[in-house]
Amino acid sequence: MFKLKELQESTADFFIYPPPVIRIKRTEECYRQHHLILFYLTQKSKLPYTHSPKMNGEKMTKNTKELGAERLKRIQDAYAMKMPDRIPVTLNLGYMLARLEGMTYVELEQDPDRALEALEKWALYFQPDSISGGLISGAPNIILGDRLTKWPGYGLDDDRPFQFVEGEYMTADEYDHLLSDPGDFTLRKFMPRVFTELEGLTMLPPIAMMLLAHGSMGSLAVLKSPPLMKAVEALLKAAQANIDAMQSMMKTGQRMTELGFPSAMDMGSMGVAPFDFMGDTLRGMKGIMMDMYRRPEKLLAAMNKFRGINFEACLQAYKFTGRKVVLFPLHRGSDGFMSIEQFETFYWPQLRDFVLDLVDAGMIPTLFYEGIWDERLNYLAELPKGKTRGMFDRSNMFKVKEVLGDVMPISGGFPVSRLKVGSVDDLRDFTKEWCEIMGRDGGYIMSASSAMDYCDKDLVKAWVDFTKEYGQC
């Protein structure tokens, strides 16, 4: 019989799980002792013991490179609206990682090495096709004194998730300034209002005065003023924090790929529906709703301008990184925010045209239809077939499949509530029906409808396994 020290020192081409990960030689003796080893490891790592000759549905004889290639093809086939060998399943654990590891949310965000270690551990346990921690670093926002967001430990308790704090940071009488010189408005008005550490930017003269070249040199003296120097220093610190966060994300992605879990999205840039662009950070919910009645022409003009600006930003990122995916989190277009008539005037035409611009430029718009879109699915059917991707939240997913199954690859929508409470038997029956309907003709990726922060690990594990069992195509 192997001793633990001998197992650790031996070489191999497959993993025993759960972590700690130990490589062992592939021999008949290994197979005979598989369950004994698993039992020992699960006692050490406090993870459930799964009595199975397979590794959560994947043969133990496959190495991580082979598993990764299989999983990547499965995901790519689904995105290409082909029939994969089975429905791929992806996990975005988010703050659930902190709960699984007994960490605070602050610790998870501020200790990327520990977060990666936790993600490795639970990736090997759940064994999905793709997995991510899903956290966006709040460090740059905190450094700048962001008034629009709150983070664990910054305006919130250490165990509370990120929050967006909407406000009106552009007044109704500032449309003309925004439209005539959006760069100047952003630099000298918007940024000082949103970020406490950038209030010194209000001291800057109009940037266009630099067109005088040598004649504008006298205005440079203001750059040495303490408020402006403080603002510049804060921007440099935030830039470094952003670089650090990006490097951590790249390290995480590389490590997950090494373990056989490819990226499911590979996002290159962020797109924003023009209506959301104006409503999220500038006018706020109340302001933009009033603008639809009181100043519709200026609202439409501003949305058209920022559609072009956002497109240029996406195109620049695509040229720089080569990544085609543009992620759109859609906030105000769902059922209930506005009437169909308003949707047809203020939301859909601008979003549709933006999406078409991106498609024509070779990019892949990936739209997260937050909320419920049941009354608007026929508009989504106007999009070019196979050129966009749809992620869904609380829409009627069987209706989504019926209306859009031949228009776009579909992901998400699985009720996160089913992964929080309930019996395993009920989850089995629900997942089986879900796979039968959503997996029909391919083009579907199994994932939760929204954040998995409070999901039960045993239900998540069962859900992944049931998807593999009933998602065979």
Image (cartoon, rainbow, N blue to C red):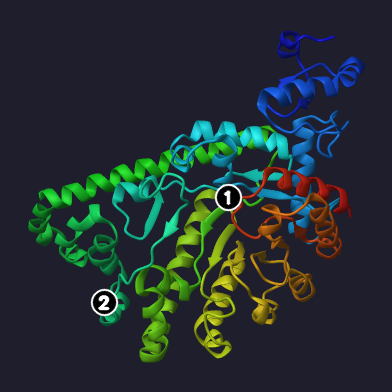
The nearer-to-camera label among 2 and 1 is 1
The answer, for residue 408, to whether it is visible in the render is yes
Q: Which residue is mark 1?
A: 453
Q: Could you tell me how many numbered marks the image carries?
A: 2
On the image, the x and y values in percent for residue 415 come to: 69, 61
Q: Which residue is mark 2?
A: 177
Visible in this render: residue 13? Answer: no
User: Of 422 and 295, which appears nearest the observer?
Assistant: 422
Amino acid at the residue labelled 1: Asp
Q: Quadrant of residue 373?
A: bottom right
Q: Nearer the viewer, residue 373 or 453?
A: 453
Where is 28 relative to 86, above or below? above
Judged from the image, the secondary structure of the residue bearing numbered disc 2 is helix
Image quarter where the N terminus lies is: top right
Query: In x, y percent, where is residue 182?
Result: 31, 71
> Which callout, 2 or 1, points at the residue further toward the start of the chain?
2
Secondary structure type for disc 1: loop
Residue shown at 32%/55% (left/top)?
Answer: 146
Instruction: Relative to 295, say whether 188 is above or below.
Output: above
In whole angstroms, how far apart are the C-alphas of marks 2 and 1?
42 Å
Could you tell me residue 130's position as x and y percent?
69, 45
Residue type of the residue flagged with mark 2: His
Q: Position of residue 279 (x, y in %)?
A: 41, 73
Residue at 71%, 57% (x, y): give it: 418
Give the left or right position of residue 209, taking residue 402 as reference: left
Image-based side of 363 in relation to 433, left or right: left
* Pick the front one: 79 or 316: 79
